[in-house]
Amino acid sequence: MQERRKKFEEQDIRIKERMGKIKHKLVVLSGKGGVGKSTVTANLAVMLAKRGSSVGVLDGDITGPCIPQMLGAKNEKPVVTPTGLSPVVGVFGVRIVSMDYFLASETTPVIWRGPLKTMAIRQFLADIEWGPLDFLLVDLPPGTGDEALSVIQFIPNITGVIIVTIPSKVSQIVVKKAVMFSKKLNTHIIGLIENMSGFVCPSCGASTNIFQVGGGEKICRELGISFLGAIPLDPRICDDMDRGKPFIAEHPDSPPAKAFTGIVDKIVEVLGVEKF
């Protein structure tokens, strides 16, 4: 027991030291799966990097990691250094750490209970040598379970949480749990993003509402949080991310890319960061 306590104390010291070199630590959270949270995280990271920020992404989805694929760094591996593990570098210099890099193959499942996932997140935070960063984005699995709780409890001085939803009524109901989760843990909610907000035809530009309209803004009014923006559907988003080519870089003039631009503007405004 004493040996384990000593190990945790040493890890806590390393976590505090490493996280202290990162200016803004942002957690991306959703109440339910299928809302495109990882896609949003990857594109936000690239948008920030394109603007000149140093950016890292921690793939906190231990059992279903996908950030390396989306950021064009699927076949790389972290490098062992004298001071820890060095992150993989993806597109636009985004630094990446994911459980995906430590699996035997892409079909290898992670069959772990909560305590093992918690230990993995603690070890990532303690042993990854991120170096100085402007932004670290933590992409979490759906819900408010072990991974979300561990990240928020282990990372000192988290800047805030970004919540992702879609306009459906079911998603609106579940995302409120994510909002209340953040409030109960006294974590600042930077705002909410509504993904898949209507379909914009890439050919003619016509917009069609696939789901309900205005669900994200309604939640924000009800719960007193900021609405960061709505991202329309575009079939090219899925194609690009599957190829490891972030959508906003491939189609910078598209409606979704412009939506991401507006969202990043609002995030840096909330954080008090000078626009860049």
Image (cartoon, rainbow, N blue to C red):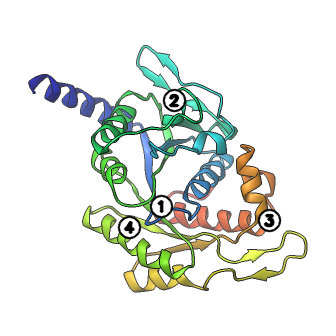
CA–CA distance in space, label 2 to label 3: 36 Å
Would residue 146 be found to the left or right of residue 75 on screen? Answer: left
Q: Which residue is mark 1?
A: 272
C-alpha span from label 1 to label 3: 27 Å
Q: Is residue 267 above or below residue 85?
A: below
Please tell me which of labels 2 and 4 falls first in the chain. Answer: 2
> Could you tell whether 247 is left or right of 144 in the image?
right
Which amino acid type corresponds to the residue marked 4 in the rendered image? Ala
Most distant residue in the left direction: 2
Image quarter in which the N terminus is found: top left
Q: Residue at x 33, y 56 (%)?
A: 145
State which quadrant residue 261 falls in: bottom right
User: Which mark identifies residue 103?
Assistant: 2
Mark linked to residue 178? 4
Specify the quadrant of the image occupied by residue 36. Answer: bottom right
Which sits earlier in the primary sequence, circle 1 or circle 3? 3
Q: The disc labelled 1 sits on which kind of residue? A: Gly
User: Callout 2: helix, strand or loop?
Assistant: loop
Q: CA distance from mark 2 to mark 1?
A: 39 Å
> Measuring 57% from the left and 78% from the top, which residue is drawn there?
167
N-term mark: 2 or 1: 2
- Judge depth for marks 1 and 4 and give the one in front: 4
According to the picture, the residue beneath numbered tag 3 turns out to be 254
Badge 3: few (under 14), some or many (20 or more) residues near its Cα, within 10 Å? Answer: some
Distance from Cα at disc 1 to Cα at disc 4: 24 Å
Residue 30 % position (x, y):
46, 63
What is the residue that sits farthest to the right in this orientation? Answer: 203
* First in residue order: circle 2 vs circle 3: 2
Q: Secondary structure at mark 1?
A: loop
Q: Amino acid at mark 3?
A: Ser
Considering only order in the chain, which callout, 3 or 4, is on the residue closer to the N terminus?
A: 4
